[in-house]
Image (tube, rainbow, N blue to C red):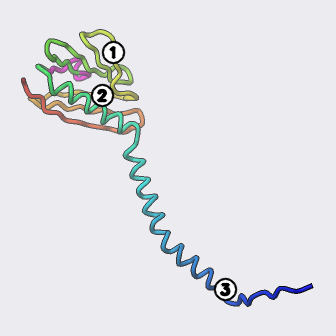
Amino acid sequence: MHRIKKPDEKGFAFLNSLFELMLLMILLPLIVLFFSFMLTFAKETNPKLLEWQLFSVDLQAYLAGSDSVQIINNGGGIRILQQSVEYDIESFEYYVRKQKFRQGHEIMLTNLKKCRFELVGTKLSVRAEFTNGIVEEAEYVVTPP
């Protein structure tokens, strides 16, 4: 039987570990950048933040074409008159709802502790506090047609 002679591997483990260490040193900053990006991405895709942004854009669309805006329920909501159609957007229990001619309701924002509307001159301020403690605020300029 023939024996296979093993090659001389002296120093191979040391060079191999140096190569792996150098590779690790190159990849570690990339891993840190990836995780910092993911943390930023996770904050931006918070469902409550996205829901607030959708509510804000929806409210802005109603205000853009409005003929008049007034506060109702002592700051608990607003009444928007838009081409002889009346919309009430008001805080109700744990959400903000929209009603057309004070009938039915469409939920616009959920999981609220409280929501306040304030109209000073032509500036409408909305402040919402969610049940998880997040507080969001928005301001709109209401201009007559």
Residue at 46% from the left image edge and 64% from the top image edge: 32
First in residue order: circle 2 vs circle 1: 1
Q: Which mark is residue 105?
A: 1
Instruction: Give how far across and how far down residue 65 sits, in percent.
Output: 14, 24
Residue at 28% from the left image edge and 15% from the top image edge: 99
Closer to the camera in the image, 39 or 3 = 3
Q: Is residue 119 above or below residue 10?
A: above
Residue at 39% from the left image edge and 43% from the top image edge: 45
Report the Cα–Cα distance between label 2 and label 3.
69 Å
User: Dividing the image into 4 quarters, which one contains the N terminus?
Assistant: bottom right
Residue carrying label 3: 12
Which numbered disc, 2 or 1, marks the residue closer to the eye? 1
Report the Cα–Cα distance between label 2 and label 1.
17 Å
Residue at 18% from the left image edge and 21% from the top image edge: 71
Which stretch did the figure color magenta?
Answer: 69-77
Which numbered disc, 3 or 1, marks the residue closer to the eye? 3
User: Dividing the image into 4 quarters, which one contains the C terminus?
Assistant: top left
Q: Quadrant of residue 108?
A: top left
Closer to the camera in the image, 109 or 132 = 109
In screen coordinates, is 55 left or right of 30? left
Q: Amino acid at mark 2?
A: Cys
Q: Which mark is residue 115?
A: 2
Q: Secondary structure at mark 2?
A: strand
Q: Is residue 38 magenta?
A: no
In screen coordinates, is 140 left or right of 36? left
First in residue order: circle 2 vs circle 3: 3
Closer to the camera in the image, 35 or 140 = 35
